[in-house]
Image: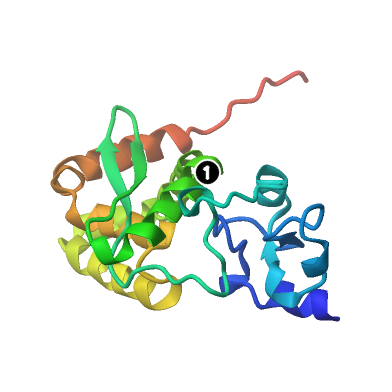
Amino acid sequence: NVRDDLKKAAPNKKCTYCGIGTPNTLDHYLPRSTYKIFSIHTHNLIPVCQECNRKKDTLASTNACEQFLHAYFHQLPESTVLYAKLHVLNPGFFFEFSILGGNPQWEKTVSRVKFQFSFLNLNDDFQQEATTFMFDNRVAFEDFFSTDKLNDHLAQNYLRAIQGYGINHWKTAIWRSLLQSEDFYKNGKKKIKNRNKKRKRTPTYKNNT
């Protein structure tokens, strides 16, 4: 029952490490092979997806810059550290994710974030999620482009993402990037229409009768 309750407590019902996968397993933050005394301590059991659990494996460094954030004891800064840079390409869109932090007060925390981000290859995972995100929102974007209300739409969803996911969630980073991208306002409509045309091609069938 304790294991089930810990899995259900994951924020947004997503993996605590990546924010994408289903938290269907518990990671030993301090590996049980080394820290047996903490193997069933609830503060050492983190709800994560199987992929992140496999990648982290028995990681346990004494160097703070080579440690993951602890879901129960570490807090992210109340300022942006996860950024997404939008590239409007031909065809489509490409997001590049990165971790940036300029406040010395949060230096050790941000160093953990950078390590975790790199160790789990989260840039690749976030890019895949961003591709699906843009496809799922393509119709809404095209509608708001047509009514010249795109800025309001992006701003409202950015604020909703902050409230629902937090300021450093990958979805929040995407909405922020779209809101701040002059290239998206200028060329996004054409790219979305072109991609919709390609996806809406009517299949042809041979008549064998």
How many marks can you see? 1
Residue 171 in the image: above or below residue 85: below
Q: Residue at x 18, y 40 (%)?
A: 187
Q: Which residue is drawn at 48% across and 33% down?
A: 201
Q: Residues within 10 Å of mark 1 (few under 14, many from 20)?
A: some
- Residue 200, horizontal then vertical, whole percent: 47, 38
Decide if residue 79 is in sight here: yes
Identify the secondary structure beneath mark 1: helix
In the picture, the quarter occupied by the N terminus is bottom right
Q: Quadrant of residue 110?
A: bottom left
Q: Point out the residue furthest to the front here.
A: 62
Q: Nearer the viewer, residue 147 or 103?
A: 103
Q: Nearer the viewer, residue 188 or 41?
A: 41
Residue 158 in the image: above or below residue 191: below
**Which amino acid, by three-letter code, is at mark 1?**
Asp
Image-based side of 196 in relation to 182, left or right: right
**What's the colour scheme?**
rainbow
- Residue identified by numbered label 1: 125
- Residue 6, horizontal then vertical, whole percent: 73, 76
Q: In which quarter of the image is residue 55?
A: top right
- Residue 80, horizontal then vertical, whole percent: 29, 62
Image-based side of 89 in relation to 67, left or right: left
Q: Residue at x 30, y 67 (%)?
A: 158
Q: Nearer the viewer, residue 147 or 11?
A: 11
In the picture, the quarter occupied by the C terminus is top right
- Residue 78, horizontal then vertical, whole percent: 31, 73
Q: Nearer the viewer, residue 192 or 66?
A: 66
Image-based side of 11 in relation to 37, left or right: left
Q: Residue at x 26, y 67 (%)?
A: 153
Decide if residue 140 is in sight here: no
